[in-house]
Image (cartoon, rainbow, N blue to C red):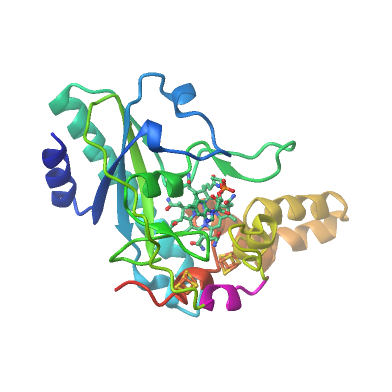
């Protein structure tokens, strides 16, 4: 069964696959998987190599790379999930590449229902680096993940004991807002404000300023560049404009 799933994944263009048992998945700050899918036994974790848009100096062009990989991973994971469901008579649920996330006023920190980094670690697809991201043995830091939760019995892979991180500190030194200064903990609010200036925070601030402006100022605001960038980020779903911690990491092909 496991071999057939891996074979199908490769046929769909998925770069790597690992299996994690729910028992081995340990993300203390995320939801209990059984609250989402009570009979879940395993996670089929899928790894996707990022393309090189992130290296472009044009932030909008860099940003669409994430949108492209996200669309591809969403489609192929759906196809693979359907294959598992149909061929092995299993229940399947997909953890998409970003949402859903908790974004309540109380917790303030965005947190995924399921942590794909911890899932990838449990599935043997890599280990944490100094940038708090998973480093894949071949793809290095330029890799993204999706997971399929299933009630199927599958032989789980083992986590990798060692990290490939060389602690060269490129990621730390190149973070424009020092969000990686403290080891094992990204300063989420610093990263968010720098990497997603047209995301939720920028959008909220725009409307607060709008409410406090005169009608003629408001007209100028909605015709201005800032609003156009906010609109585009929401419409395209590509909100990241900083990739420094990923693109300056020398690991990977
Ligand atoms: C919300 C979110 C964000 C938020 C907040 C992140 C956060 N709270 O940790 C913000 C906007 C800041 C963000 C930024 C980025 N993100 Co993001 N993000 C997510 C999302 C949706 C949820 C993450 C989450 O739940 N975190 C909360 C909990 C789980 O984190 P935590 O318990 O505090 O975990 C920390 C510790 O475990 C620690 N840690 C450090 N060392 C070690 C060692 C071990 C052994 C262990 C167990 C843990 C550990 O690392 C964690 C971070 O501090 C995931 C997708 C998903 N569903 O998982 C993508 C995800 C984590 N993001 C991803 C990426 C690529 C990025 C960015 C590079 C964006 C970009 N420009 O492309 C930056 C990188 C920032 C950085 N260097 O940390 C990828 C990571 C891929 C990878 N190779 O690991 C993910 C998995 C998306 C995906 N589908 O692949 N992200
Ligand atoms: S995405 Fe940018 S701001 Fe966020 S941690 Fe990485 S380098 Fe820093
Ligand atoms: S840039 Fe250097 S320190 Fe940062 S994750 Fe990559 S190898 Fe590790």
- Residue 107's x, y, as percent? 70, 39
Residue 5: x %, y % from top left: 16, 40
Instruction: Give the vertical position of 126 relative to 246 (above or below).
Output: above
Q: Quadrant of the N terminus?
A: top left
Which of these two is toward me, 40 or 220? 40
- Going by the image, does 113 lie left or right of 228? left
Q: Is 171 one of the magenta-colored residues?
A: yes
**Camera-side residue of 182 and 200:** 182
Q: Quadrant of residue 81?
A: top left
Relative placement, left or right, of 171 versus 97 is right
In the rendered image, the residue lying farthest to the front is 161
Quarter of the image for the C terminus: give it.
Answer: bottom left
**Residue 88, position as x, y percentages in the image:** 15, 25
Is 28 one of the magenta-colored residues? no
Which residue is depicted at the point 62% across and 57% down? Answer: 185
Q: Residue at x 87, y 55 (%)?
A: 213
Q: What percent of the width, then of the height, locates residue 146?
A: 36, 45
Is 91 drawn above or below residue 196 in the view shown? above
Compared with 1, 40 (above or below) is above
Q: Which residues are magenta?
A: 169-177
Number of numbered discs present? 0
Question: Which of the pair 143/226 is nearer the observer?
Answer: 143
- In front here: 155 or 54? 155
Indicate the quadrant where residue 56 lies. Answer: bottom left
Say left or right for 120 vs 170: left
The residue shown at (58%, 43%) is: 111
């Amino acid at each position: 069964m496991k071999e057939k799933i891996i074979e199908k994944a490769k046929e769909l263009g998925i770069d790597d696959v690992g299996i994690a048992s729910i028992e081995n998945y340990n993300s203390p700050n995320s939801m209990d998987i059984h609250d989402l899918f009570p009979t879940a036994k395993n996670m089929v974790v899928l790894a996707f190599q990022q393309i090189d848009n992130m290296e472009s100096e044009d932030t909008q062009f860099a940003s669409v790379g994430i949108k492209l990989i996200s669309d591809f991973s969403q489609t192929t994971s759906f196809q693979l999930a359907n294959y598992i469901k149909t061929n092995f008579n299993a229940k399947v649920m997909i953890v998409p590449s970003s949402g859903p996330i908790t974004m309540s006023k109380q917790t303030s920190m965005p947190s995924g229902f399921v942590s794909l980094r911890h899932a990838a670690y449990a599935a043997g697809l890599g280990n944490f680096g100094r940038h708090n991201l998973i480093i894949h043995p071949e793809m290095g830091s330029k890799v993204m993940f999706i997971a399929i939760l299933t009630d199927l019995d599958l032989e789980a892979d083992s986590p990798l004991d060692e990290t490939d991180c060389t602690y060269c500190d490129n990621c730390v030194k190149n973070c424009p807002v020092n969000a990686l200064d403290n080891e094992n903990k990204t300063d989420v609010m610093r990263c968010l404000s720098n990497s997603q200036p047209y995301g939720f925070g920028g959008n909220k601030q725009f409307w607060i300023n709008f409410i406090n402006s005169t009608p003629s100022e408001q007209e100028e605001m909605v015709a201005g560049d800032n609003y156009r960038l906010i609109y585009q980020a929401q419409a395209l779903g590509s909100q990241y404009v900083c990739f420094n911690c990923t693109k300056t990491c020398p690991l990977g092909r």
